[in-house]
Amino acid sequence: MFKNIFTTLAAMWSASAVFAQTVAPAVVPSGAVAAADLGILASISLFIAGWAIAILVVLALFGIIAEHNDSRGWAIFWMILAAAVAYFAFSISLTSLIIGAVAYIVIGLFWSFWRYKRHATKVVEKFKTATAIEKERALKALHPKEMLSTITAWIMIWPFSMIENMIGDLITGIQMLVTKFFRGVYHKVYDSAVAALR
């Protein structure tokens, strides 16, 4: 019985192969096959681009949170990862990459000027009523020579820094909401979970 099934399947396979080699090219124009192949490639590209956009959004969120918490090393890491995902997912040409990199750095430089000015204003405001020693220490730490790594980070991660500056108050509000208002809820969950161990 199985021998008959295999024989029938083999005959159908060879017949379809002969059809594909002789009849199909005469019936289906080669342009239609090429168009079908392009349609499949376009669908795959859109699928990859869709996932890449979702991944980029997640990486951007991680970068913004890292910048908000002054973890600039992590923010740079998330930015490099996002750039790699964008490069491989969207097939960016070398010329576009170079032009984009130059534009990115120029925008980052201008952003770092504004960001440093804003930071300096906040520090001066914070230490207005401080002691003379605290003021001197704060002014020394505020000097551009002392902030070189921070300024470089602002240039490299300017999109994260810019978004964080726009929604930083919202992030701080959410953190305060969790720590102040929901602290009791989290403590009750913790106490009930740990009660079994006591």
Image (cartoon, rainbow, N blue to C red):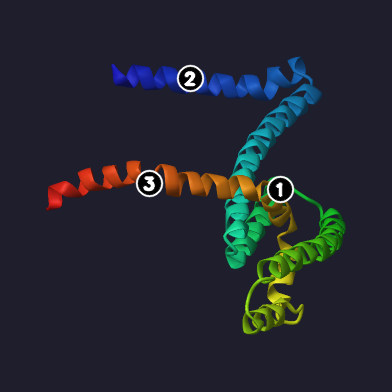
Q: Nearer the viewer, mark 2 or mark 3?
A: 3
Q: Is residue 89 above or below residue 146?
A: above
Earlier-in-chain disc, 3 versus 1: 1
Residue displayed at 65% across by 41% down: 53
Say what secondary structure mark 3 lies in. helix
Nearest to the observer: residue 160 or residue 53: 160
Q: Amino acid at mark 1?
A: Met
Question: Disc 2 to disc 1, how far (Cα)?
Answer: 69 Å
Question: Disc 2 to disc 3, how far (Cα)?
Answer: 72 Å
Q: Is residue 112 left or right of residue 75?
A: right
Nearest to the observer: residue 105 or residue 21: 105
Nearest to the observer: residue 1 or residue 182: 182
Say what secondary structure mark 2 lies in. helix
The crowd level at tag 2 (other Cα within 10 Å; few <14, some 14-19, many 20+) is few
Q: Nearer the viewer, mark 3 or mark 1?
A: 3
Q: Is residue 136 above or below residue 176?
A: below
Say what secondary structure mark 1 lies in. helix
Q: Amino acid at mark 2?
A: Ala
Q: Nearer the viewer, mark 2 or mark 1?
A: 1
Residue displayed at 69% across by 37% down: 45
Disc number placed over residue 166 in the picture, else none: 1
The crowd level at tag 1 (other Cα within 10 Å; few <14, some 14-19, many 20+) is few
Earlier-in-chain disc, 2 versus 3: 2
Q: Position of residue 38 (x, y in %)?
A: 74, 31
Q: Which residue is mark 2?
A: 11
Q: Position of residue 189 (x, y in %)?
A: 28, 42
Disc number placed over residue 183 in the picture, else none: 3
Q: Position of residue 16 (x, y in %)?
A: 57, 20
Q: Is residue 58 left or right of residue 11?
A: right
